[in-house]
Image (cartoon, rainbow, N blue to C red):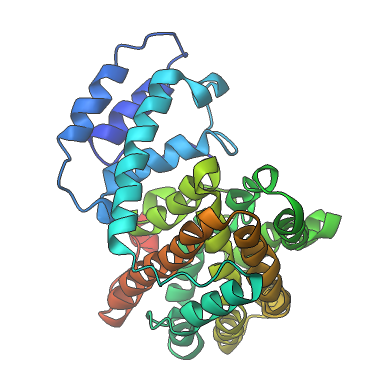
Amino acid sequence: MKMPTPRGPVSSILMDILATAPQHHVPALARLGPAMEAAAGVQLMDDDDLQLALFCLYELHYGGIEGVDDRWEWHPELTAFRLELERRFEGVLRRMTKVPDAPPPVAADVAAALFKLTGDDDGPSVSKYVAREATAEQLREFLIHRSVYQLKEADPHSWAIPRLTGRAKAALVEIQADEYGGGRPERMHSALFARSMRGLGLDDQYGTYVDLIPAVTLASVNMMSLFGLNRRLRGAIVGHLAAYEMTSSIPNKFYSRGFRRHGHGEDVTGYFDEHVEADAVHEQIAGRDLAGGLAEAEPDLLPDILFGAAAALAVDALVGTHQLSAWQAGRSSLRIPLDLAA
């Protein structure tokens, strides 16, 4: 993606660093720690500066950032800074997430606990609002929020593949094979989402709208990268994916209905229609074989499986509350309204 615009002292220093060639010692790196300490006590989930900095650090492990030397990816001092940001972020996630009591580490019991957790979720229903009330401009904003993940859909969860074995690994590969189009690039879910964006006149290049996306939406994507990139959190990324699959099919039916209400056809709704069918199957695989299989193989990971699922619901509720509060008040849910950004 292109380098985004800094949002504060930390992201400004970071981007200045990334614009240079990597060296063993980079003087500006010493400024990152004090800049972050100055932000102590902020509400991290809503902090544009720190969430953007973390997002950019994670992008070094995905497709990279235009003009940034790839050798920055594992620069030791930059990695140390990322680890400190991650420590704070994970602490916030664990404090804000209510994790249910763990069932026995038996696949059927784990799946039942996850289905209950997701079934009891009472977070705001963005999908029903999209289906019944969203304006054409709000539909565009909805796609922009989701683009920061959907245009690389499945990638954060794929980090877990080499970290699993047996039943859980086979289940994850089965799910991911569908996410990546079963070998057909035009059927990759990220490609289907890009087509939806083009259908609404939006730019489908990854990262185009990062400057418009608020901290809480970046936090939802950063959470996936945190869980996926760290092997010790492999239980959390499995729980996260299970929750996503279990809460996807019905909302996507509503999303599709909302776009059709505005006269859009299959070129726009195809992405959502695909998930109605695919995720009805994936939720069973994710619950029993992926999460349940991992819990049976590594019972010590069961608390993190439940944490990952509960955190996915909690953070998505924050994002949904942000969007609906803005739309129902007649405001843009973006940092910069799309018409002003254009």
Residue 204 occupies quadrant? bottom right
Residue 154 occupies quadrant? bottom right
Q: Residue at x 34, y 69 (%)?
A: 98
Left or right relative to 23: residue 264? right
Question: Residue 202, image x and y in percent?
Answer: 55, 60
Left or right relative to 10: residue 167? right
| Residue farthest along the front direction in this orientation | 104
**Number of numbered discs overlaid on the protein picture:** 0
Task: Check the picture and name the quadrant holding the C terminus.
Answer: bottom left
Residue 295 occupies quadrant? bottom right
Q: Residue at x 27, y 33 (%)?
A: 10
Q: Is residue 154 visible?
A: yes
* Vertical relation: 195 (above or below) 261: above
* Vertical relation: 127 (above or below) 337: below
Question: Residue 237, image x and y in percent?
Answer: 54, 55
Left or right relative to 278: residue 45? left
| Residue farthest along the right direction in this orientation | 183
Q: Is residue 202 visible?
A: no
Q: Residue at x 59, y 79 (%)?
A: 252
157, 265: nearer the viewer: 157
Task: Check the picture and name the quadrant holding the N terminus.
Answer: top right
Question: Residue 125, image x and y in percent?
Answer: 42, 83
